[in-house]
Amino acid sequence: MKEIRVVFTTLMKLSLMLFLIMELFLINGCGEKGGRIALEEKAGKKMSEDTIPEKGGEKMIVKKSDRVKVQYTGRLEDGTIFAKSEAGEPLKFTVGSGQIMSGFDEAVEGMNLDEEKKVTVKPEDVYGERKETLIREFHRTSLPESLEPEKGMVIELRDRTGRAVPGIIIDIAEDIITIDFNHPLAGKDLIFNIKVVGIE
């Protein structure tokens, strides 16, 4: 009888140890994520992918309404750089807020932190197509007397509402000056190299 009691006690101890090992495995899991989920489930609440802290608590994927920091370079099809963020001074904006051109905004949504992407933004998503109706001719006498026009010069004229409208002088004749009021990037594909460097 004493031997049966000893065997029973030993079996109980082994069962208890096995239970503890299994419990430990459930808590720690096969990896970090599994362990956290097991702990949360034991506490009565389940963690979603969005609430799992990663990389010191920083968000890892850009979502709408996130405040992001982006390093970028903008080029035309011929390789000409028309815009570039300065080192240490990334572009900051809120995704989906309409603060920047829609094509750029949409490209950033869904990117990972530190991910790089190349995207082409079409004219209809930025400055539209060029319009011949925005190329106007002006008699010299209708322009400010102090103006000394040169081709390529950017000048501002006022419309009927008093709003400043910038234009580029594209031709100078004896008495006629031709000004293009299209945006300089109108009608062009804009190619951006983007890197997400911060998500808030």
Image (cartoon, helix red, strand yellow):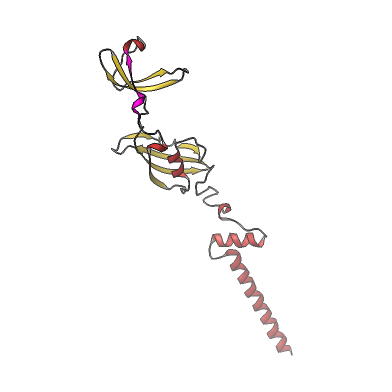
In this rendering, position of residue 6 left or right of residue 191 = right
Q: Magenta includes 55?
A: no
In this rendering, position of residue 38 left or right of residue 115 = right
At x 28%, y 12%, the residue is 175
Give percent across and percent down for residue 165. Answer: 41, 21
Nearer to the camera, 131 or 100: 131
Relative vertical location of residue 172 with respect to residue 71 in this rendering, above or below? above
Relative vertical location of residue 179 with respect to residue 88 in this rendering, above or below? above
In this rendering, position of residue 152 left or right of residue 35 = left
Instruction: Count all numbered tags in the image, as a single digit.
Output: 0
Relative vertical location of residue 79 with respect to residue 181 in this rendering, above or below? below
Q: Residue lying at the far left in this picture: please name it.
A: 174
Determine the image quadrant of residue 10: bottom right
Over which residues does the magenta segment extend? Answer: 130-139
Q: Residue lying at the far front in this picture: please name it.
A: 133
Q: Residue lying at the far right in this picture: please name it.
A: 1
At x 65%, y 58%, the residue is 45
Nearer to the camera, 172 or 110: 172
At x 63%, y 61%, the residue is 39
Q: Magenta includes 138?
A: yes
Give percent across and percent down for residue 184. Answer: 35, 29
Give percent across and percent down for residue 5. Answer: 72, 86
Determine the image quadrant of residue 18: bottom right
Q: Quadrant of the N terminus?
A: bottom right
At x 68%, y 79%, the residue is 12
Give percent across and percent down for residue 167. Answer: 36, 22
